[in-house]
Amino acid sequence: MIFYNEDLRKAHHLKEWFYSICQNRKYSEQRRQFRLWIQEAESCRVAEFHKVAKCYQNWAREICAAFKHTDITNGTTEGFNNRIKVLKRTSYGIHRFERLRTRILMAMN
């Protein structure tokens, strides 16, 4: 399909390019490529990429910080959230917030 449609080919190229930027381990190169990617997405004929480019431009500093600090994740927080959701699901019938809170605190220890 991408061989027959120029917009689809461009979208695929931008997607793959962004994946390669994320996989790159050199921060300075990531930052440079990211800025180029935004410029390319802004000039693309695919309207959806204009929205993405504008969003990435607004959040460029934060996105570049995420490239730099790859050792920081929210995995622990997501794990706690998942455990709390499971407790809420299995605690059907607990109507008082304090009891649910106590059960969550007991389970997390």
Image (tube, rainbow, N blue to C red):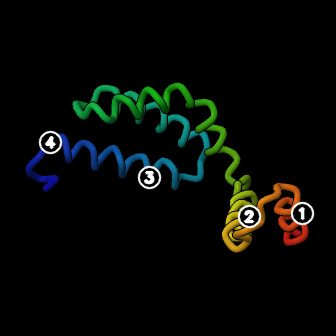
Task: Using the numbered discs, state the Cα–Cα distance from disc 1 to disc 3 in whole angstroms.
Answer: 43 Å
Residue, disc 4? 6
Closer to the chain start, of discs 1 and 4, is 4
Residue, disc 1? 102
Q: Residue at x 72, y 55 (%)?
A: 71
Query: Against 7, is 98 above or below?
Result: below
Task: Using the numbered discs, state the Cα–Cα distance from disc 3 to disc 2 in whole angstroms.
Answer: 32 Å
Q: Amino acid at mark 3?
A: Tyr
Q: Residue at x 47, y 30 (%)?
A: 55
Is residue 85 shown left or right of residue 43?
right
Q: Amino acid at mark 1?
A: Thr
Q: Residue at x 71, y 60 (%)?
A: 81
Residue, disc 3? 19
Residue, disc 2? 84
Q: Amino acid at mark 4?
A: Glu
Task: Using the numbered discs, state the Cα–Cα distance from disc 1 to disc 4 in whole angstroms.
Answer: 58 Å
Q: Quadrant of residue 102?
A: bottom right
